[in-house]
């Protein structure tokens, strides 16, 4: 547990930086004396001009996830997920960046999407695979899976379910974190992102999708450099300040842990991929690739006690591609779906799910 917690903290900080780069690339575009992390001026200009997230109201998405774990004392693990389907969000009156908490339940009425998922899992004495499909239309979730539901369609009134959850949280609102501490954490995050040598960006081979040239940029994150940065400890302290239950640690203790992180992740590679349309300057893809090789002899300092004697290899690959940007999502409600109420008692009959409107 101690090992998982410490590794989780390290990867969480790395993930925060990746998310910051993914959703606000201008944070890094002009850092390090405008060198743009190794890109040419032309590529840097293209990368900086790519935003357009407000235009991504509808598209088709295909994504894949692959995860392998090799070297455990029990057995290796191999997980694969592939999915595709349309997505559409009606921004009229509810922009993705301006939805208030009170309007969260109403948001689902503006969301239309479907996904067909194929998955497989291999592990100790297990070799499973299956298919799952879900659709969201007019505030209702429809789902079915050959294993999860024996191929039968079920439906959930999302608006009612979200309203119920928000009602149950009444009284909790207003207990957010300290705004000043949050600003301090964001400032430390920015400083950490500007650590020399932490990030390098390269333009990989272009592709052509729907008659448009797509530029692929790969961000390479050097985790040992990240953990050795003088800005790492201040960021961890700022994060801990947001959690009242976090254990108190001195700067010296945190520095020891950061040094241990740097050693533990010395054979880890962490990369992010962004695909940008050369003509429309819109996002057309996003990916994450993580490869970790954990040496039991170096992991003991982080609290590992049962990794065995073999190195632990962890590989994670995720890639999502967007096509048909601007196209309408063609989603229909399946017939005969059985209403399913989240959190209801097994003996309590479910209420009927609202019928799909004629427009759908």
Image (tube, rainbow, N blue to C red):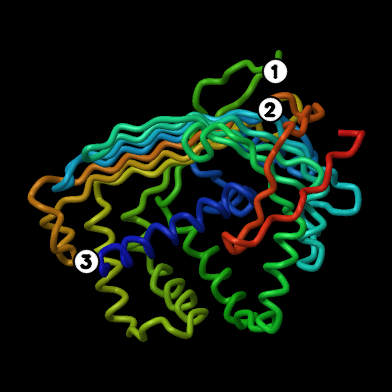
1 and 3 marks in contact (CB < 8 Å):
no
The numbered disc on residue 212 is: 1
286 or 213: nearer the viewer: 286
Q: Position of residue 7 (x, y in %)?
A: 32, 61
Q: Earlier in the sequence, mark 1 or mark 2?
A: 1
Name which residue lies at 74% across and 31% down.
335
Depth check, mark 1 against mark 3: the one in front is 3
236 up-or-down from 247: above or below? above
**323 versus 155 height, above or below:** above
Secondary structure at badge 2 equals: strand
Name the residue carrying label 3: 302
Classed neighbour count for the residue bearing mark 1: other residues with Cα under 10 Å, few (<14), some (14–19), many (≥20): few
Check the image and name the residue furthest to the left: 309
The Cα–Cα distance between marks 1 and 2, rounded to whole angstroms, is 7 Å
Q: Is residue 14 left or right of residue 292?
A: right
Answer with mark 2 or mark 3, whichever residue precedes in sequence. 2
Q: Residue at x 55, y 32 (%)?
A: 151
Residue assigned mark 2: 277
Q: Secondary structure at mark 3?
A: helix
């Amino acid at each position: 547990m101690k090992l998982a917690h410490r590794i989780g903290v390290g990867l969480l900080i790395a993930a925060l930086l990746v998310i910051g780069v993914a959703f606000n690339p201008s944070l890094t575009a002009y850092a390090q004396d405008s060198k743009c992390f190794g890109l040419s001026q032309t590529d840097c200009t293209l990368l900086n001009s790519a935003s357009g997230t407000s235009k991504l109201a509808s598209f088709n998405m295909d994504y894949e996830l692959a995860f392998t774990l090799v070297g455990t004392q029990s057995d290796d693990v191999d997980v694969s997920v592939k999915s595709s389907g349309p997505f559409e969000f009606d921004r009229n009156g509810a922009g993705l960046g301006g939805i208030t908490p009170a309007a969260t339940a109403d948001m689902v009425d503006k969301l239309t999407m479907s996904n067909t998922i194929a998955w497989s899992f291999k592990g100790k004495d297990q070799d499973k695979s299956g298919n799952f499909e879900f659709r969201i239309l007019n505030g209702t979730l429809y789902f079915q899976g050959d294993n999860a539901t024996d191929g039968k369609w079920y439906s959930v009134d999302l608006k009612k379910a979200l309203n119920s959850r928000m009602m149950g949280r009444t009284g909790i609102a207003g207990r957010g974190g300290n705004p000043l501490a949050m600003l301090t954490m964001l400032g430390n995050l920015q400083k950490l992102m500007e650590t020399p040598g932490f990030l390098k960006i390269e333009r990989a081979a272009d592709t052509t999708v729907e008659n448009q040239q797509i530029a692929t940029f790969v961000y390479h994150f050097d985790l040992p450099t990240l953990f050795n940065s003088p800005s790492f400890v201040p960021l961890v302290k700022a994060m801990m300040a947001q959690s009242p239950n976090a254990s108190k640690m001195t700067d010296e203790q945190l520095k020891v842990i950061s040094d241990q992180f740097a050693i533990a992740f010395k054979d880890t590679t962490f990369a992010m991929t962004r695909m940008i349309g050369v003509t429309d300057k819109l996002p057309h893809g996003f990916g994450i690739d993580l490869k970790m090789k954990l040496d039991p002899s170096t992991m003991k300092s982080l609290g590992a006690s049962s990794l065995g004697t073999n190195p632990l290899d962890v590989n994670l690959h995720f890639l999502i591609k967007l096509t048909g940007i601007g196209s309408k999502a063609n989603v229909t409600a399946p017939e005969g779906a059985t209403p399913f109420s989240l959190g209801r008692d097994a003996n309590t009959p479910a209420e009927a799910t609202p019928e799909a409107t004629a427009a759908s």
